[in-house]
Image (tube, grey):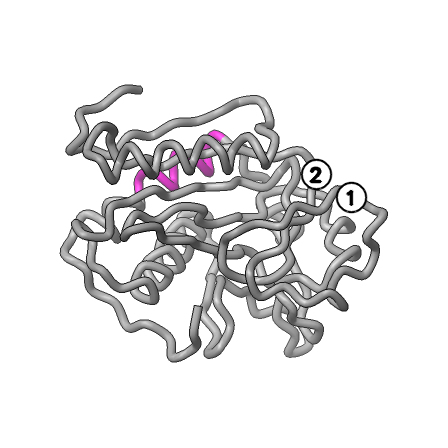
């Protein structure tokens, strides 16, 4: 779907996109957005199974380094898993147009996930000091359902969110997801929500404008991204 440079393009890839290729494509698009040669972009995709390490990743959080390939990413955050059944939404926006506040941008990505989950009757929540979206589980436990990691280059954002729709949650055992040991991970499927990826994509696109089309308004968490 092509658009004029002043509009946001939505792209959806049906086949899994290798992580390294996706990063290269994002970096090229960021440069084009910065130069006014391309539209802002929301890119919906999946990756083949991989662990990615953000700029804050700790070596001891890679529990099983032989389990999957590991890619050292320039995004913020720590270790996370990407794989089939997880909807990746890369959000490439010119923050000169959306507010030059990275923490506010992260807050809005969280808000987008919370509103998307509400479309499926799921209550996603923020937690102080922990970037991402969480589900209150049984017995007082909490589980992460959406991870967020961003990078900004000359005020153009890229990377974005990873929403667990129906991934193999066992793959998270090879890492300490986002450096948090005391909580787990979950997915829509694990919560009994049999949503298709197409249904998730529809909800993501429907809820996006609710958060990003209006002038920036957020209550950024105190934690540093």
Task: Give the residue at mark 2.
Answer: 49
Q: State yes or no: residue 200 in magenta.
A: yes
**Camera-side residue of 139 and 76:** 76
**Camera-side residue of 24 and 108:** 24
> How busy is the neighbourhood of tag 1: few (under 14 within 10 Å), some, or many (20 plus)?
some
Residue 39: percent from left, percent from top: 24, 31
Task: Give the residue at mark 1.
Answer: 68
Q: Of the two numbered discs 1 and 2 on the same chain, state the one appearing first in sequence.
A: 2
Residue 30: percent from left, percent from top: 34, 38
**Camera-side residue of 158 and 204:** 158
**Camera-side residue of 82 and 144:** 82
Residue 201: percent from left, percent from top: 43, 35
Residue 151 seen in render: yes
Check if mark 1's residue and mark 2's residue have beta carbons within 8 Å.
yes
Q: Secondary structure at mark 1?
A: loop
Q: Residue at x 17, y 25 (%)?
A: 4
Q: Which residues are magenta?
A: 198-206
Q: Quadrant of the N terminus?
A: top left
Q: Quadrant of the C terminus?
A: bottom left
Q: Secondary structure at mark 2?
A: loop
């Amino acid at each position: 779907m092509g658009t004029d440079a002043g509009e946001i393009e939505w792209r959806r890839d049906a086949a899994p996109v290798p992580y390294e290729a996706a990063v290269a494509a994002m970096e090229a698009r960021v440069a084009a957005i910065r130069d006014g040669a391309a539209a802002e972009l929301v890119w919906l995709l999946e990756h083949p199974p991989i662990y990615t390490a953000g700029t804050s990743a700790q070596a001891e959080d890679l529990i099983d380094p032989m389990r999957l390939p590991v890619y050292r990413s320039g995004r913020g955050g720590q270790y996370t898993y990407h794989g089939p059944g997880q909807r990746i939404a890369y959000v490439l926006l010119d923050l000169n147009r959306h507010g030059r506040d990275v923490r506010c941008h992260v807050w809005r990505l969280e808000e987008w996930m919370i509103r998307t989950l509400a479309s499926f009757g799921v209550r996603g929540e923020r937690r102080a000091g922990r970037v991402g979206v969480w589900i209150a589980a049984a017995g007082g436990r909490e589980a992460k359902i959406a991870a967020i990691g961003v990078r900004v280059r000359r005020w153009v954002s890229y990377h974005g969110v990873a929403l667990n729709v129906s991934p193999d949650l066992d793959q998270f055992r090879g890492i300490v997801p986002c450096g948090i040991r005391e909580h787990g991970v979950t997915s829509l499927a694990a919560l009994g929500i049999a949503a298709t990826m197409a249904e998730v994509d529809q909800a993501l696109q429907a809820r996006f404008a609710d958060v990003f089309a209006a002038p920036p308004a957020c209550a950024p968490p105190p934690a540093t991204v």
